Image (tube, rainbow, N blue to C red):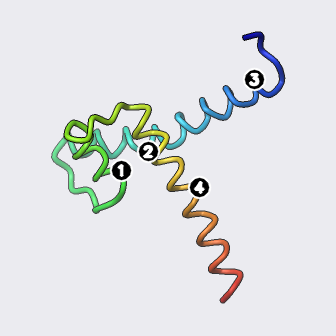
Amino acid sequence: MFPNAMVIRGTKLNQDLRKTYGGFVKDVERKLQNGEQVQDCLAKMMIQSSNKEHLTELDVDMMAAAFMIGGVETVCLYESLV
């Protein structure tokens, strides 16, 4: 497949999502490994169940991104209704 504008944009978006939300997941994972207290959250749950559920790093990063993007839309919608 030859790179075109849409492929390039999609690749950049994927990289940015993984950097942003994958970085957040990595921060939570590091804290857990260091024995620090981490509030219950989606990232913590996915990290703790990744072996059981056979989740790859990419799976966890993309699910974190999907839930954050969906959550932002939900909060924006809720705030516009209040």
Q: Position of residue 11 (x, y in %)?
A: 67, 26
Residue pointed to by mark 3: 8
- Which residue shows up at 28% across the image and 53% down it? 45
Q: Amino acid at mark 1?
A: Ala
The residues tagged by marks 1 and 3 sit, at their Cα atoms, a distance apart of 28 Å
Report helix, strand or loop for mark 1: helix
Q: Residues within 10 Å of mark 2 (few under 14, many from 20)?
A: some
The residues tagged by marks 3 and 2 sit, at their Cα atoms, a distance apart of 24 Å
Q: Amino acid at mark 4?
A: Ile
Viewer-side residue, 76 vs 39: 76
The residues tagged by marks 3 and 4 sit, at their Cα atoms, a distance apart of 21 Å
Specify which label sits upstream in the sequence, 3 or 4.
Answer: 3
The residues tagged by marks 4 and 1 sit, at their Cα atoms, a distance apart of 14 Å
Q: Amino acid at mark 2?
A: Phe
Q: Amino acid at mark 3?
A: Ile
Residue pointed to by mark 4: 69
Image height check: is 71 above or below 6? below
Q: Residues within 10 Å of mark 3 (few under 14, many from 20)?
A: few
Query: What is the tally of numbered marks visible in this picture?
Result: 4
Residue pointed to by mark 2: 24
Residues at circles 1 and 2 in contact by the CB criterion of under 8 Å:
yes
Q: Residue furthest top?
A: 2
Residue pointed to by mark 1: 43
Specify which label sits upstream in the sequence, 1 or 3.
Answer: 3
Specify which label sits upstream in the sequence, 3 or 2.
Answer: 3
Q: Residues within 10 Å of mark 4 (few under 14, many from 20)?
A: few
Q: Quadrant of the N terminus?
A: top right
The residues tagged by marks 4 and 2 sit, at their Cα atoms, a distance apart of 14 Å
Report helix, strand or loop for mark 3: helix
Residues at circles 4 and 2 in contact by the CB criterion of under 8 Å:
no
